[in-house]
Every structure is written in C-alpha cells, then in structure tokens.
Amino acid sequence: MSLILYNTLTRRKEAFQPLNPARVTMYVCGPTVYSYAHIGNARPPVVFDVLHRLLKSRYGQVAYARNITDVDDKINAAAKAQGAPITAITDKFADIYRQDMAALGVLPPTAEPHATAHMAEIIAMVERLIASGHAYAAEGHVLFHVPAFAAYGQLSGRNMDDMIAGARVDVAPYKKDPADFVLWKPSSPDLPGWDSPWGRGRPGWHIECSAMIEKVLGPTIDIHGGGNDLIFPHHENEVAQSTCAHNGAPLARFWLHNGFLTMDKEKMSKSLGNVLLVNEILKTAPGEAIRWALLSAHYRQPLDWSDDLIAQSKKTLDRLYLALDQVKHIVAANTGAPAAVITALDDDLNTPIAMAEMAHLVRALNSATTDAEKAKLKAELLATGAMLGVLQQDPATWLKGDVSSSGVDAAEVESLIAQRNAARKARDFKEADRLRDAITALGVVIEDRADGTSWRMAG
RNA sequence: GGCCGAGUGGUAGAGUGGUCAUGCAGCGGACUGCAAAUCCGCGUACGUCGGUUCGAUUCCGGCCUCGGCCUCCA
C-alpha cells in the first residue's frame, strides 16, 4: 500500500515517497492573526491534520510546520482601529486560533513559526536574491524580478503574457516588469518596521513562508499545503523566491490544495462578509461534529456549509458513539484500522470512503454476538476514528452532551426515569407514558435496555 | 478574456466501462407494553447533444449552467 496524492504541480495523482523517510516534512500556510478564523479557514488545518496523522502512522514522525503570520497590513489596520498595540492583536488571535483548532481535534503542528521571529532570515534571503540577480531594490522597496525566473507560472499554470493582458491593477512605477512583486517594503514611523539594508521596513506577503520553510524544515520539503486560492499568487511566488534562493532546488515536491467552503454555493470569505466564525459555531455544536462535517466531502471538492450539514454530522456521530457505548465494558482488541480504511485514505485522502467504512464497522459491531468479535470491531472503529481525529472521547460524555448548558437537571431526569420504571413495573403504562412525555419535553431521549434505562440529550 | 474545477437519487456525498457506495430523511418488517435504539428489506440517480464501444453515469468532443483564481483571501 502506498500513499497517492494529487499534486497541483503536475495536475495528477502521484505516489508519495518522502525525500527522507526518517524526517517527512510538511508545511501548511497558517493564519494571519488579525481576527477570528471562520469555518472556511478551518478546512486546511483539519484536512492536513488527517494527512499529518496518516504520515505519522506510516513514518513515525513528521516535521510539520504551520506558520503564524503576525506582520501584515490588516493587522496594522486592526490595531489602529482598536487603538491597541500590534502584539495585543496578534497574541489574542493566535491564542484563539489555537483554541479553535484544538476544539476541532487538530493536533498541534510540530512547529509554529512566527514571521516576526524570522526577520533576520527574511532579510538574508532577500539579500541572496539580490546577489543572485533575481531581485532588485528600488525606492526603498525590494522586488522580485519575475522574468529572471523562467519557470514562473508553472505551479498555477499561467503564462505571463496572459496575466499582463488581464492585469487589473496599476503597475507601480518602480517595477521593472509589471509582474514583479514585493519582497520588502518601507514602513512609515507609525508602522511596525525592522532595520534592513534598504532602510526601515517590513516584509512582503510571500517571503516569510519561504524564509521560515528554509529555516524550520530545509530547502526542499516533501509537502506544501494550503487553500486553493493561495496557488496564485502566494504559492507561485514562494516557488520563485525559494527556487532562486536555492540555486534551483525545488521548494516542495508535492503541492496540495484544498477546495473551498461555500455558503449558498458562494465562496466564504472575509471580503464578501458571508462568514461563520469557528468560535461562534463551537457555541452551538460540538467541535467533533464540525470536524466530521469538514471531512464529509473529499478535500479537493467544494463543500457547501449549512446547519443541516452539522445536524447530520452530529447524528452520524451519535450512532457511532451509541454503538461504542454498548461495548464500553469490552476491552478493545489490539487491532488497527481495517485495510479498507487505509486504502481509502491512501487514495488522496478519501475521507468519505473512510467514513463509509465506519458505517460498515458500526453495523457489524451492532450485529456482533461474541465478545471476541466485538473487541475486534471496537478496536477497528476506534483506530479508524483516530485516523480521522474523531471518536476518541468517552461515549457517555458525548451522548449526554453538554447537560449543564442545556438547562436540564440531571437529577430530575433520573428521578422521572425511576418513577417511570416503577410505573412500568406496576404495569401502569398510562402513567409510564405520561412520564416519558415529560422527559421528552425536557429534550431528553430515553432508551430501555436489558441493563436499565439510559438517557441522552436529543438532537 | 486567460487558467482551473464542478454538475450524481428527497438531501449530503463517493465511485465505476456491464451486480452494491455510504450517511441522513422516507417506506415496510422484526424487536418493544408503547417507544427509542438496533437489525432486516425497499425505493428514486448520474446537466445536455454527439462520438468511440457489444455496452457509458463512467472514455472523447461540442454545448449549457454554476463556482474559483487572475487584487487581500484557506
């Protein structure tokens, strides 16, 4: 079995082999921390978390870096608007981001480089690019000279003539070529800046990733991931900078890009304003259900977000946890995820197929009659859940839901159940049904089982 | 205009050159005092027009529709 990944660079699926199996390297573009992450922002970290888990299970350890961009004009604007220091903004939203991602079951990356902590590396890389003739300084700016890199446009499949023809922005007068992009730009005294050979300034948008990848992971990494919209210009420019700074060594061997999350079929984006914040959704739905929803479509496909999607995801997880709850006293066998699950994930992270396999497992588990069977199926289900980053909490905890926030008094429910069971014992079914209606009215579902009556929150 | 991607049953969403996705919803049955949960069974599908083929939802081409990138954006 081997992992097959769709490589944006070649536009086809390719067998993945790490450069060095003892140190698989992966980089995913992280957030610019100037406000809350929306649910679309959460798709890459969740998707690449599944890849992270898969790589870990195969190669033991993965050097996985996800950056924090803490220098950016939008951060400056936010700080100005709120009358707060820059670092107050970036620290706050970096913290919130980490918390949100943890709530979605995303394992921390092995490194979380901050742009502001890598100014020396950024400046050094810019200097190298100037020295090698790939960049030039002009009016306090440093620009990457796109015609100096013949392979420019390869990743995004564009050619320069078309782009110039379709250009929608005014070309700055100091650019030698309209496609040239900024590596370094001057800062006015009221903006954050760092001393450099070109005066006090700050980095352009793309150079930080190139510099941090080199520093944290090395010149050529195995996998670089991010959202579809980053292919151009962000990743194209990263390729140009890094390749030229490394004498032609490629930046990344595999480029992976996730499809977009939409709302009513339209891209969710901060500029359009149609965003749902992860932080807000987490107040109304468990993080695990949100994660399940994000993985319910293949990562390269578009995914239309809706309340119904979360509701369905939650119900599906209910069913899985209900089955696990039935076998809580059975010790899971020492078995990993079934081959079908591995095969599915190996095929370009086909999470919907892996989820379908979980449905097979849960049906088999519910039908199993021997403890040995149950122990094996329980183990397979849990192992599959671990690959996807779900199903790892105590079933009872999941099924009870957040009782405290629901306003339901657990003692009252237990009391009503006891009264109902007394009525059932006395064969007073009218009273028993009345009591159950009262329980239902509280939003609680009860189930009579051989070992007693259990209850959980409905919906 | 250039470059990408998508159009599947009530819904979400995989996949395949000729039997089955799967979840949710629905229907029938079993179980239950009745339910719930669970199990068993059932149903409706592949945008459009051509081509290749014994046979296409699947391959090829045209068309239509929708979305994305080309400017900050996951």
Image: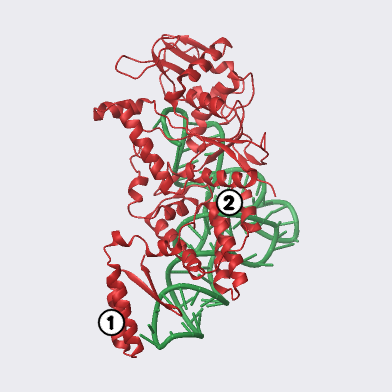
Chain colours: A red, B green
Q: Residue A6 — which label?
A: none
Residue drawn 35% across the image and 43% down it: A275
In the image, taking residue A25 as reference, residue A289 lies left or right, namely left
User: Which chain does the residue under circle 1 lie in?
Assistant: A
Q: CA distance from mark 2 to mark 1?
A: 47 Å
The amino acid type of the residue labelled 1 equals: Arg
Vertical relation: B74 (above or below) A306: above
User: Three-letter amino acid code at disc 2?
Assistant: Asn
Q: Which residue is mark 2?
A: A350
Q: Who is closer to the viewer here, A373 or B74?
A: A373
* Image-based side of A366 in relation to B60, left or right: left
| Mark 2 on the same chain as mark 1 | yes
Q: Position of residue A380 (x, y in %)?
A: 59, 61
Q: Chain of mark 2?
A: A
Q: Secondary structure at mark 2?
A: loop
- At x 24%, y 27%, the residue is A83
Dot 1, crowdedness within 10 Å: few (<14), some or many (≥20)? few
Q: Which residue is mark 1?
A: A434
Say what secondary structure mark 1 lies in. helix
Q: Nearer the viewer, mark 2 or mark 1?
A: 1
Please tell me in which quadrant of the rendered image residue A153 appears: top right
Q: A399 or A172: which is nearer to us?
A: A399
Determine crowd level at label 2: few under 14, some 14-19, many 20+ residues with C-alpha closer than 10 A. many
Task: Tell me: A264 left or right of A155.
Answer: left
Q: Are marks 2 and 1 in contact (CB under 8 Å)?
A: no
Give the image location of residue A365, x and y in percent: 56, 69
Vertical position of residue A362 compared to residue A289: above or below: below
Residue at x-position 29% and y-position 77%: A416
Residue B57 on image: x %, y % = 61, 56
Q: Quadrant of the C terminus of chain A?
A: bottom left
Q: Residue at x 50, y 30 (%)?
A: A232
